[in-house]
Image (spheres, helix red, strand yellow):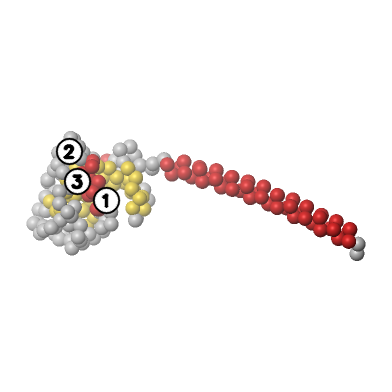
Amino acid sequence: MNIRFLLFLIVEQTFLAVDAKKNYYRILHKYVSELQNEIHKMNEITDISPCPDAYSLFRGPDGPFCYKFDYTCANWTEARETCQVEGGDLLNPREDTISFFASFIPRTLGNNACTNTFWIGLSDKDIEGDWRTVRGIVFSSQSTRWSMYHPKGISDYDCALIDVIGNSPIKSASCSNIGHPLCQIFLN
């Protein structure tokens, strides 16, 4: 074989390889641009809150939900009805999220507050001492989230509230006491 011919083949293959790389990078650039556009669209969608007006989004361990500190002054039943009218219920308390809401309350209290407490969806109205959320989930009376000496074994202390005063936020109280609704709307 002729050396010139070999050099010609090498140069030709090099040009083909360079063209192939250029084509590969052009296609890759196109895909990267398309992916960036899709990411941008997804970010625009997630920036839109799925919550109704006056509600905020909370991304909890059970999935996202909307919540609202309502300043209506109401007993537990009225507070629950306030939330239900808006498509939700009183906050379904969890060990790992209740502290967030308790720490957030002092910042939300303003001149419209008639009390420093918010009703949550927890009661032992059906069976004394059997504390359950409004969704029927058992909430331990031994939880460290209860304030000292709570829940009280007093028969008419059947509802739970978050009190901003004290180290542990949840207290049992008479359902006829006045508090504010802490509403929750589940998204799933």
Q: Residue at x 27, y 42 (%)?
A: 68
- Depth check: give the residue in front, 153 or 22: 22
Location of residue 12 by image quarter:
bottom right
- Depth check: give the residue in front, 7 or 36: 7
The residue that disc 2 covers is 113
The x, y position of residue 56, in whole percent, is 32, 42
Q: Amino acid at mark 1?
A: Phe
For residue 118, which numbered disc appears in the image?
Answer: 3
Q: Are marks 1 and 2 in contact (CB under 8 Å)?
A: no
Side of 18 where 59 appears, left or right: left
Local secondary structure at mark 3: strand
- Check the image and name the residue furthest to the left: 154
**Mark 3, residues whose alpha carbon is within 10 Å: few (<14), some, or many (≥20)?**
many
Q: Are marks 2 and 3 in contact (CB under 8 Å)?
A: no
Tag in front: 3 or 1: 1
- Depth check: give the residue in front, 7 or 71: 7
- Check the image and name the residue furthest to the front: 3
Q: Residue at x 41, y 40 (%)?
A: 48
Side of 79 where 31 appears, left or right: right
**Mark 1, residues whose alpha carbon is within 10 Å: few (<14), some, or many (≥20)?**
few
The residue that disc 1 covers is 100
Local secondary structure at mark 2: loop
- Depth check: give the residue in front, 6 or 49: 6
Side of 22 where 33 appears, left or right: left
